[in-house]
Structure formats: C-alpha cells, structure tokens
C-alpha cells in the first residue's frame, strides 16, 4: 500500500496544480545493489552451488529472474495522488516572487 506525501511535493501537468505525490519506497535502489552483492557472493560460491544441482541451481535461477520486477520498482516515478499522472518536481520559489522582497541591486 502506498500513501501520498503529507506536503505538496510535485507539480501535476494534468491537474495544473501543485499536488501531494505518491512515491515508491526510497530504498529500492539500495536493495538492488544488495541484490547484485548477493549475486557476486553466489559467483564466489560456484563450486558449492555446482555440487548441489538439484536445489541450489534452480533456486539461483529463480533469484536471477527476480531482477526484472526489482528493476521495474527502481524505475517507478512519483505520481499525482489525485489523478495518477507522473508529476514534475516542484521548482523552488524564487526570491523575486516572494512578498516583501526586493530585487538584487548588486549588478549595476
């Protein structure tokens, strides 16, 4: 279950407004690196894996097949909580648009 962020963190081109976003879990990329670490460890343990071809090799094949869904989760982009469109990041407010601010007079 994914939940929307508490603050408005994106701009939705479909809603034309700043909106709350639904973001995937932030640590999918780190988990992916750990996945490749386990795969490298399995490479070093090849002699042990090859002697038990009935259990370990099919298990390793299933483990290798799991990279597809993991890559899909890493590539997932934030979406609008209202309509589901992919959102753009919020642009920081410029100091000229803030009330009570004056433009910089240092470039004369």
Image (tube, rainbow, N blue to C red):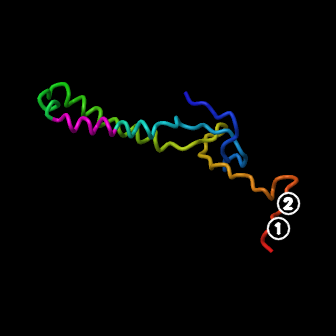
Range drawn in magenta: 36-46
> How many numbered callouts?
2
User: How many neighbours does mark 1 have within 10 angstroms: few (below 14), some (14-19), or many (20 or more)?
Assistant: few
Of 3 and 39, the residue lying toward us: 39
> Does the residue at mark 1 contact the one at mark 2 (Cβ under 8 Å)?
yes
Task: Identify the disc placed on residue 105.
Answer: 1
User: How many neighbours does mark 2 have within 10 angstroms: few (below 14), some (14-19), or many (20 or more)?
Assistant: few
Residue 104, x across and y down, in percent:
80, 64
At numbered mark 2, what does the secondary structure look like: helix, strand or loop?
loop
Q: Mark 2 points at which residue?
A: 102
On-image quarter of the C terminus: bottom right
- Left or right: residue 39 versus residue 57 is right
Q: How far apart are marks 1 and 2 (CA)?
A: 9 Å
Choose top left, top right, bottom left or bottom right for residue 58: top left
On-image quarter of the N terminus: top right
Q: Which residue is drawn at 85% across and 60% down?
A: 102
Magenta stretch: dominant secondary structure: helix
User: Residue most toward the bottom?
Assistant: 108
Q: Residue at x 22, y 38 (%)?
A: 43
Q: Residue at x 78, y 71 (%)?
A: 107
């Amino acid at each position: 279950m994914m939940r929307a962020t508490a603050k408005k963190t994106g701009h939705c081109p479909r809603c034309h407004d700043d909106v709350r976003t639904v973001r995937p879990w932030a640590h999918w990329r780190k988990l992916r690196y750990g996945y490749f670490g386990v795969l490298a460890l399995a490479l070093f343990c090849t002699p042990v894996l090859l002697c038990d071809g009935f259990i370990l090799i099919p298990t390793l094949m299933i483990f290798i097949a799991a990279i597809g869904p993991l890559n899909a989760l890493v590539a997932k982009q934030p979406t609008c909580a209202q309509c589901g469109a992919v959102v753009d990041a919020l642009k920081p407010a410029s100091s000229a648009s803030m009330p009570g601010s004056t433009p910089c007079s240092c470039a004369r």
